[in-house]
Every structure is written in C-alpha cells, then in structure tokens.
Amino acid sequence: MLSAVEKTRLEISKSIGSIKKSKLGQFFTPAKTAQFMAGLFGQTTGGNCRLLDAGAGIGTLSAAFLEKQICDSSDFQRVELDAFEIDATLHPYLKRIIEEYKQHIDVSLTISGDDFIETAVDSICGNLFADSLPRYTHAILNPPYRKIRSKSLHRIALRQAGIETVNLYSAFVALSLSLLENHGQLVAIIPRSFCNGPYYHPFRKFILARSALRHIHLFDSRNKAFKDDDVLQENVIILLERSGQQVDVEITTSTDDSFSDIKAFTHPFCRIVFPDDSNHFIRIPTSSEQSDIELSDSIHCSLDDLCINVSTGPVVDFRHKEDLREMPETGAIPLLYPGHFNGHTIDWPKSGFKKPNAIRRNAKTEKWFYPNGFYCIVRRFSSKEEKRRIVASVVNPADFPDTEMLGFENHLNVFHKGKKGLPEMLARGLTIFLNTTAVDENFRCFNGHTQVNATDLRQIKYPGREALTALGKWAKHCGEPTQTLIDEQLKRLYR
C-alpha cells in the first residue's frame, strides 16, 4: 500500500509551489524513509496505541507505522491516530490513505487543522477552555522547518510550556515529547543543526532531561533525504523514549534514503554527549573506533587551559559602509576577509576583489580593531563542495608592514590572547593542528553543517602549549607542508 502512497506524494509535491513549501516548511517524507522510521519503534505491549503525527502531510508516516503493525502482527487492540495538518487541502488525501488500512487493522483517525503549537501548549499548560490531548504512546514526525521569530506568538506560547527554541521543527519535537506518556516513543526526521551551537542549547537540555536517546541515523549525503524537494539541509532520524533510562546509543548511517548500504554501531552515551560538556553537544561517531583525538592522552586541553581566546571577527562591514575602502590608503588599515586567505598564503590587497581591502581608522571604528601580530584564523563558512569544514591560516604581521592595527571581518574566527596577537610559534602550531585530518573528522561528529562558530572551536580538545609550539617550529621549518606531512606530525604527538 505504501507504493500507492508514494505515488500520491510525488504528484502532490510537484503540484505545490516552492513559495507555499517555504511558508509552511512543508517537505513530504519519502516512503522508504517512512518505512525506516516506523521500523525504529520498539516491540508493542498490547492495549491501545495512541499515535501522534504532528505535521502529517498526506499521512505517509502514519501509513508506514500502520503497515509495520500489520506486517508484524501487532498485538495492539486498536490504534487511535491524531493527525495534525494545518494545510486543509491535504486532509482529503490524508483521510483516504488511512481509510485504506482500516480493512487490515482497527484504527481510528482524528484530523485537526488547528495550529499544533497552540493546541499542544494549551493542553500541556491546562488552559481552561482548551481541549485536552491524550498522553500518546507513540509519536512519528517529519515536522515543518522554519525559523521562529523571538517576539512571535509561537515563541511566547512555547515559553508557557517551558520550551525555548528557535525553529518549528524543534518546537514540534519538544511538544510531542511532552505529550508522550512515560516510556512512550518518539521517532522524528529533523535537521542535524540542533546537535550543536548555542541557539539549540535549551532544546538539547530539554530533550536530554526528559528522554533517553536510543537511536540516531545519519545520511552521509546531505542532499538525498528530501532530494525531490532539493533540500540541502543535513538531516538525522532520532528515536527518543520519554523518561527512559539512558544506556548505549545505536548509530546507523547510510549514503541516502535507499538504506542499501546501512552500517550500524553502538556507542556508550558518554561518547555521544560528553559528561563534562555544559553545552550538551550531541556527537555522532560514524565508526566503531575512537578517533585519534579521543585516544590521545596528550590532546586534552581546552582553550581556557591554553589561555587562548577565540572570537568572531568583530567588523560587520555593512555597519561601516562609509568607512570601507576598495584599496589601502592613508588613514585606512587592512580589512581581512576569508577571500584574502589561500592556504598558507595571504593575498592582500587583492585587486579585482568584490570586497573592500581596507577600512578607515577613526574614533568610531577604532574599538573593532586588533593590534598587528600573529593570529590563527578559521573561516566561519565553507562551501558544500569543500572536503574540509575547518580551514585555518596564520596571520603574519610581516605581511602588513607599516600598520599598527588589523580589521577582521565577521566571517572569520580569530584566535587571540585578550584581543592581542599570539606568540608566533603558538599561532603557527595551532594552525597546523586545526588543519589536521583528525581534527576535521572529530569536528564532523558534532557539527553537521558548513558553519564553524567560535562556540564549536571551543569544544575541540587541543595539545598543550609546549606541543603546539613544537608544531609551530616544525611548520615554519617546513614552509608549506602537505596534508600527509601534517597528519604524520600530529601522530608523533600521541605516540
């Protein structure tokens, strides 16, 4: 029956305009993905199943759930399905698809076109005139993906339920989890962006405090989970158990939504969320072996231990339009963008550059500058085609003679010491370390997008200052070492 559902999905998806999809954050789940998600639920224990499908679309996820119960000869006496779908044009398809299953399983369907966030918050908070939702045994979700403005009605409503989050998808997951009974299970396909970064920290704390993380599935290819809609966001599938006891976590990976090359690993929870990590970053190891960074006793320092700071470049160019200069001139200082850095070299000033090369130094701009010196720079954004997430470079004061100050644009991360430069060999060694394959692979365990923030760089464990300084001396002697030489030199640190 799911093949017919898939045919309907493709037809409807093509007929819905991109503007409407974007407005509703509406991307329908492919049938194979829905089957995989439904297969993650644990064994049934009889009684009635109360299933929540929030953002149900045409009902592909619910259909996959029902099909699994039929194929597995489920011992549920009855399935009571509550499907929330704000787009009323999809209700006839949703009803027709679920009706097809009634001849095979005892299922009741309630379709709601109400706003799920408002309805769920009213029920959770016990608002006087609101209808009370049941406690669900299961929830299966492909929630909408769209940012929530800080002063929006949704944001205000969510705070009533103790939920602080920035996107509809995380709001739907948090509310659905709150509506589960104890040991109820939730399966959702959502963007990986919640796993790290400060914006989703309250959401991570919320779900980890209220549930056990049982399973994470990662797609190796960023554009295959919703390829029919050209979605480039990296997605994961998660299984949560409300009020469950946290034990090991199963990690599975596949190249795409065919699941033809699926690999499975089991990891202790302490490898997924480090016990001493106050940010609660969720890491997704993709092999059974620990990385070189994890195995090394000599790579254990935080940036605080090293007395090194990392900050986002302070110059936001559009706020200083009248002071920007295409090329250097008297009274202006170098303004450095990612485009000025090319591997081990700095191309400044850059002729034909689309960005300015300099910025005027005056009383208004002075506070945004750093003294000329040695710095380690990491680009905040890499393109989707690049093999590396972390790309580090050294700023050498010799490249900027006759200038006292430097401007670092907002698309750079700057390693410094109290807004001043670092010792030369420390800056060079730090750059070499960040450019190792081991660091890049370790970083990908908790960062699933192309943005590299200062908060992410603080999560990395570093060698001590002495080891970094030794790396720096080696790097200066080598000139422009190859990736192979860089990786071999790192290995000497933990042999």
Image (spheres, rainbow, N blue to C red):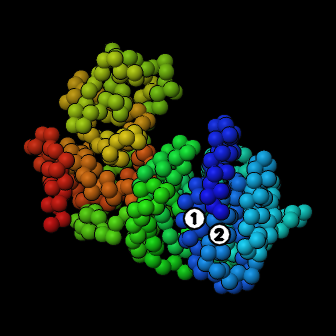
Disc 1 is placed on an element classified as helix
Please state which of residues 332 and 319 is positioned toward the viewer in this rendering. Answer: 319
In the rendered structure, are the residues bearing label 2 and label 1 in contact, judged by CB atoms less than 8 Å apart?
Answer: yes
What residue does disc 1 label? Answer: 35
Numbered disc 2: secondary structure: helix
Q: Is residue 197 above or below residue 352?
A: below
Q: Is residue 220 left or right of residue 483?
A: right
- Which quarter of the rendering shows the N terminus? bottom right
Residue shown at 26% from the left, 53% from the top: 437
Q: Position of residue 48 (x, y in %)?
A: 74, 80
Q: Earlier in the sequence, mark 2 or mark 1?
A: 1
Other residues around mark 1 within 10 Å, as few (<14) / some (14–19) / many (≥20): many
Q: Nearer the viewer, residue 426 or 9?
A: 9
Residue 76, given in percent of the width and then of the height, sits at 70, 81
Say above or below: 138 vs 465: below
Depicted 320 relative to depicted 129: above or below: above
Mark 1: amino acid: Gln
Residue at left offset 63%, top offset 65%: 64
**Quick one: quadrant of the C terminus?**
bottom left
Which residue in the structure is indicated by mark 2? Answer: 67
The image quadrant of residue 70 is bottom right
Whether residue 92 sits left or right of residue 149 in the image: it is: right
Among the 4 quarters of the image, the one containing residue 412: top left
Residue at the outermost right position: 129
At 27% from the left and 40% from the top, the residue drawn is 393
Residue 45 visible, this angle: yes
Q: Amino acid at mark 2?
A: Glu
